Image: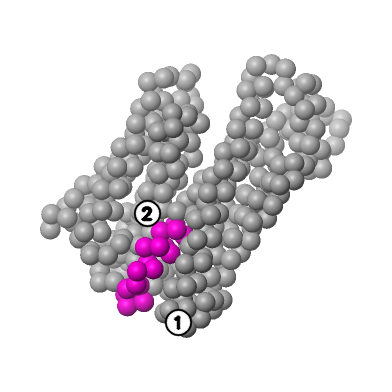
Amino acid sequence: MIFSTLEHIFTHISFSVVSIVITVHFLTLLVDEVVGLDDSSEKGMVVNFFCITGLLVTRWIYSGHFPLSDLYESLIFLSWGFSLIHMVSYFKRRKYNLSSITAPSAIFTQGFATSGLLTKMQQSAILAPALQSQWLMMHVSMMVLGYAALLCGSLLSVALLVITFRKVITIIGKNNNQSFSFGEIFYMNERSNVLLNAYFLSSKNYYRYQLTQQLDRWSYRIISLGFIFLTIGILSGAVWANEAWGSYWNWDPKETWAFITWTIFAIYLHTRTNTNLEGVHSAIVASMGFLIIWICYFGVNLLGIGLHSYGSFTLTSN
């Protein structure tokens, strides 16, 4: 009883804190930058991290198994992964405003997990026979951490694209007689040095240029980390599948989409080896990967079929 009460307390505190963090971010968009508000949002994400950690530990002790047995627990763990990524940046004393990405991601996943749609999953149950293995912690934790890192990195690439496209539209909007095409965008991206001298003359526009470079650099770092986690997760899952089902690969819907996700981000990392494809080109690939991840992680669960059907999404019946 006490563990269940603690779990609810940690859930409500963490959800409230991350809601306040997002509110603070909206306030900073409406008014000039305030140091106190920025510090509050950073500290709020730290509190959220420890609350979700306490929630997971409490559920682990209460249920007797690692809390990654169903969709509800994996969503909470995914939210913890978003907070963990923010914590790494926070303790390195590097303020890259990652909470603008991690905070909305955390509240989205945690909000859906604690909604009425997953009420049945919120109740701890006996671990399914197929999940009673030491590979559960290794495989699922690596996969979910990989999803968290790849989603954050992809969102940074989306932000880069938004800033770049707005910049290009602003430039072309000044020349109404010229036609607009995506080829011009790529050409302008490749001629970034020329743009730096010709267009980024004011401090505001030069700051925008620095921001896009920062987004591109951090997107690459986080996606690289997520790709490592995803690779370890797929390999450990193959070993587990061989022990449980007698085959390393069965082309299950979840396995198929995990392979597609791995391929997309392998292509992204390959484009990064070519300096001519950095920036907008690689960001487009990462943005595609953002959609692929959600199909792999959540969309396949809607089908409720395959060998991974234990993590399927079920509506609560009244």
Q: Which of the colour schemes (rainbow, by chain, secondary structure, one colour) is used?
A: one colour
Rendering coords of residue 256 (x, y %): 57, 70
On-image quarter of the C terminus: bottom left
| Drawn side of residue 48 relative to residue 270, left or right | left
Q: Mark number for residue 265?
A: none
Alpha-carbon distance for marks 1 and 2? 26 Å
Q: Mark number for residue 245?
A: 1
| Drawn side of residue 121 relative to residue 168, left or right | left
Q: Taken as a whole, is the magenta stretch helix, strand or loop?
A: helix
Rendering coords of residue 140 (x, y %): 42, 63
Looking at the picture, does residue 276 appear above or below residue 229?
above
Disc 1 and disc 2 in contact, CB within 8 angstroms = no
Local secondary structure at mark 2? helix
Please name the amino acid that badge 2 sits on: Phe
- Between residue 238 and residue 130, name the one nearer to us: 238
| Drawn side of residue 103 relative to residue 160, left or right | left
Residue that appears at 37% across and 48% down? 80
Looking at the picture, does residue 200 appear above or below residue 117?
above
On-image quarter of the N terminus: bottom left
Location of mark 2 (residue): 77
| Drawn side of residue 243 relative to residue 114, left or right | right
Q: Residue furthest left?
A: 1
Please name the amino acid that badge 1 sits on: Trp
Residue that appears at 48% across and 36% down? 98
User: What crowding class fits label 2: few (fewer than 14 Cα within 10 Å), some (14-19), or many (20 or more)?
Assistant: many
Looking at the picture, does residue 246 appear above or below residue 230?
below
Magenta part of the protein: which range?
A: 128-144
Image depth: mark 1 or mark 2 in front? 1
Local secondary structure at mark 1? helix
| Residue 180 seen in the figure | no
Whether residue 139 appears in magenta in the rendering, the answer is yes
